[in-house]
Amino acid sequence: MGSLSGILLRPVLVWNPSLLHCRNRTPSSSGCTNKVNDLGVSFYNCVHPKSVHTQSSLLSDSLSRSEDGEEPPQERLPFVAGGIVALGKFEALHIGHRELAIQAAKIGVPFLLSFVGMAEVLGWELRVPIVAKCDRKRVLSSWAPYCGGMIPREFQIEFSKVRYLTPRDFVEKLSKDLGVLGVVAGENYRFGYKASGDASDLLRLCNEYGIQACIINSVMDKNQDPSSLYSYDAKERGQVSSTRVRYALAKGDMKYVSELLGRHHRLFLMVGDQEKFTSDRCRVSAPKSCLLNLSPREGVYENCSIMIDEKVIACRVVIDTTHIHLDWDKHTCITCQQLNLVGIDIVG
């Protein structure tokens, strides 16, 4: 529960929702300066280059190295050990999620920690994902320039295995079972059984277990629709969220979607079964059941593009109640064999 040097430190915690707060393991050696990034998020830049990165390296070595048949001392720890985990649901991988990864990367090796199987356990309606599973690695790779050249990795825990953990039990699991060195969460983050723990509890418990903790402001939506989400989501307070992304997709406002995501929405179409779609020289039509993630509302979307064999081809996308249609220039040659998995950037 002490610092990396073995000295027991109990820094004073200050809770002020207007700022990001860092619970530092070695506060006397860290330099924290108040800054505002290009998203308007106020935060303290807390750098612990020696303590965190050295510890991460040591843990990594202990996981991968075994000499003379000796068992690595940390072999039971998962690959997230020694890392800094951002906590959240990470459904849309939007700019608010990216900000969590950025702050985690400022401290150490960034991971996104989330739970799987929540809908099944809690009886929620299963929803089409916003980001196709096959596309998540690409999106996270695009965050590397924001994260000091590091690509955040995902680490998921079965919700059924942690559902009844108290806030204290959850933090203890992070420390002892997962071996993480720090956590980053948003100011509205809640955790533990029945969401009984909040951000201030996370700071306090991380302090007790010797884990660095940073709480950051929510990234706010600068272009809010005045009639937006409050009627059906009481948690919405104007922050960027996966709910807002779904709302924007439902309206077909792809400019708004791009602002929330920090990238164009990429729709994936799987058309491996040749009987499921029709094709001529410059059009492909497929049922919407072939889509792997959430599409925008019915309509015509000009200036889009499709990715086939690493080639970017301009196209127009038409979505109706049952099918999606891709139209491209008649001089562009695309064969049926190339249409197994198609990524479509929907611009608007």
Image (cartoon, helix red, strand yellow):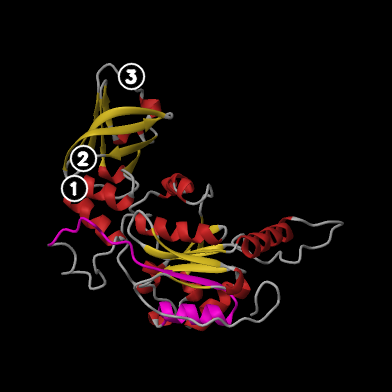
Q: Which residue is mark 1?
A: 252
- Residue in view at x 48 percent, y 78 percent: 203
Query: The disc labelled 2 sits on which kind of residue?
Result: Gly
Per the rendered image, the range of residues in magenta is 197-226
Q: Classify 10 Å Cα crowding around label 2: few (below 14), some (14-19), many (20 and above).
A: many
- Residue in view at x 30 percent, y 65 percent: 125
Horizontally, is 29 left or right of 158 in the view?
A: right
Return the x and y of residue 43 as percentages of the image width and height. 41, 65
Horizontally, is 285 left or right of 342 in the view?
A: left
Element under disc 1: loop
Q: How many marks?
A: 3
Return the x and y of residue 339 as percentages of the image width and height. 37, 31
Dot label at residue 348: 2
Spatial CA span between label 1 and label 3: 29 Å
Query: The disc labelled 1 sits on which kind of residue?
Result: Gly
Indicate whether residue 74 is drawn in magenta.
no
Q: Is residue 211 visible?
A: yes
Spatial CA span between label 2 and label 3: 24 Å
Element under disc 2: loop
Q: Earlier in the sequence, mark 1 or mark 3?
A: 1
* Quadrant in which residue 265 is drawn: top left
Horizontally, is 97 left or right of 151 in the view?
A: left
Q: Which residue is mark 3?
A: 333
Spatial CA span between label 1 and label 2: 8 Å
- Residue in view at x 22 percent, y 50 percent: 256
